[in-house]
Image (tube, rainbow, N blue to C red):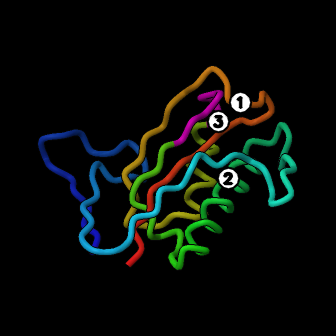
Amino acid sequence: MRKEIRPRSVPQPVAEYAQGVEVTGGRTLYIAGQVPLDASGNLVGEGDFRAQARQVLRNIQAIVEEAGGSISDIVKMTTFLTDMAHYDDFKAVRSEFLKAPFPAATLVAVSSLVRPEWLLEVEAIAVIE
């Protein structure tokens, strides 16, 4: 079971995420940071942030589905952006994949990732019932 935690004593989220997610039961799946590579290891969307974001979220979706769940089972997501100018684009693409109830989420601006052509990396935790 999944329950969103939104105490009145903390600020409400500034985007589509939960301040806290309480989960009872289920299996926990930890998803390593996903980057915009396809199954063959090819970069998807060089210089195109939205294409890269879609590939990253497709990779996460594939991992959760392989474990017997769905992308709606994600309870925590951490996103690393190399340029905060892409923040609104990320929110738009994320909304194509995630619907309420939203996971707890953290977004971090970083100076670079392992490869300079990668514009973002996302790691996630899912609880599959």
Q: 25 or 98, which lies in front?
A: 25
**What residue span does the magenta drawing correspond to?**
79-86
- Compare marks 1 and 3 and give the one earlier in the sequence: 3
> Left or right: where does residue 3 sit relative to residue 85?
left
Give above or below for 69 relative to 57. below
> Left or right: where does residue 9 sit relative to residue 72?
left
Q: Residues within 10 Å of mark 1 (few under 14, many from 20)?
A: few
Give above or below for 92 relative to 73. above
Residue appearing at x 49%, y 53% in the figure: 124
Residue appearing at x 37%, y 79% in the figure: 129
Q: Position of residue 94 (x, y in %)?
A: 57, 55
Badge 3 is on which residue? 86
Q: Residues within 10 Å of mark 3 (few under 14, many from 20)?
A: some
Q: Amino acid at mark 2?
A: Val
Q: Position of residue 13 (x, y in %)?
A: 33, 45
What SS does tag 3 mark?
Answer: helix
Q: CA distance from mark 2 to mark 3?
A: 14 Å
Task: Quadrant for residue 24, please give it.
Answer: bottom left
- Compare marks 1 and 2 and give the one earlier in the sequence: 2
Q: Position of residue 93 (x, y in %)?
A: 63, 54
Q: CA distance from mark 1 to mark 3?
A: 18 Å
- The label nearer to you, 1 versus 2, is 1
Badge 2 is on which residue? 56
What SS does tag 1 mark?
Answer: loop
- The label nearer to you, 2 versus 3, is 2
Q: Which mark is residue 88?
A: none
Badge 1 is on which residue? 114
Q: Residues within 10 Å of mark 2 (few under 14, many from 20)?
A: many
> Left or right: where does residue 2 sit relative to residue 108?
left
> Left or right: where does residue 1 sit relative to residue 9?
right
Q: Tags 1 and 2 in contact by the CB under 8 Å rule?
A: no
